[in-house]
Amino acid sequence: MTTPELTEIQAAKIVDARAMSCPGPLLEAKKGIATVKVGEVLEIWSGDANTKVDMPRWCEKVGHEFLGVLQGDGYERLFIRRMK
């Protein structure tokens, strides 16, 4: 997805993991994805640079769609669509 498309996504849930270091944001994403319906989007806020590497790998492994990353103010916003 392109950046403009990501800015228009309405996430079903936002998980604020900015204060956590790896693997905290990934663990929060695992918990958060279970709370949204199939087809909905989970947005994760993370201040850990490793999250943008770990999250796409996790999505591929478990079968969710990693939509991309937007830069926030001192953190990153990651978007995942629940696929199952």
Image (cartoon, rainbow, N blue to C red):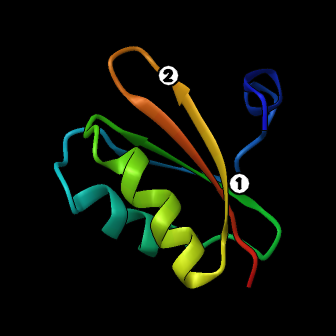
Residue at image position (36%, 26%) is 75
In the rendered image, the vertical position of residue 1 relative to residue 59, given as above or below: above
The kind of residue tagged 2 is Gln
Q: Position of residue 24 (x, y in %)?
A: 23, 60
Which one is in front, 14 or 30? 30
Which one is in front, 12 or 82? 82
Residue at image position (44%, 74%) is 30
Residue mark closest to the camera, 1 vs 2: 2
Q: Position of residue 47 (x, y in %)?
A: 28, 34
Residue denoted by label 2: 71
**Numbered disc 2: secondary structure:** strand
Residue denoted by label 1: 12
Q: How many marks?
A: 2
> Split into 4 quadrants, where in the image is the C terminus?
bottom right
Residue at image position (66%, 72%) is 64
Q: Position of residue 65 (x, y in %)?
A: 70, 64
**Numbered disc 1: secondary structure:** loop
Mark 2, residues whose alpha carbon is within 10 Å: few (<14), some, or many (≥20)?
few
Left or right: 63 in relation to 74 = right
Residue 10 lies in what quarter of the image?
top right
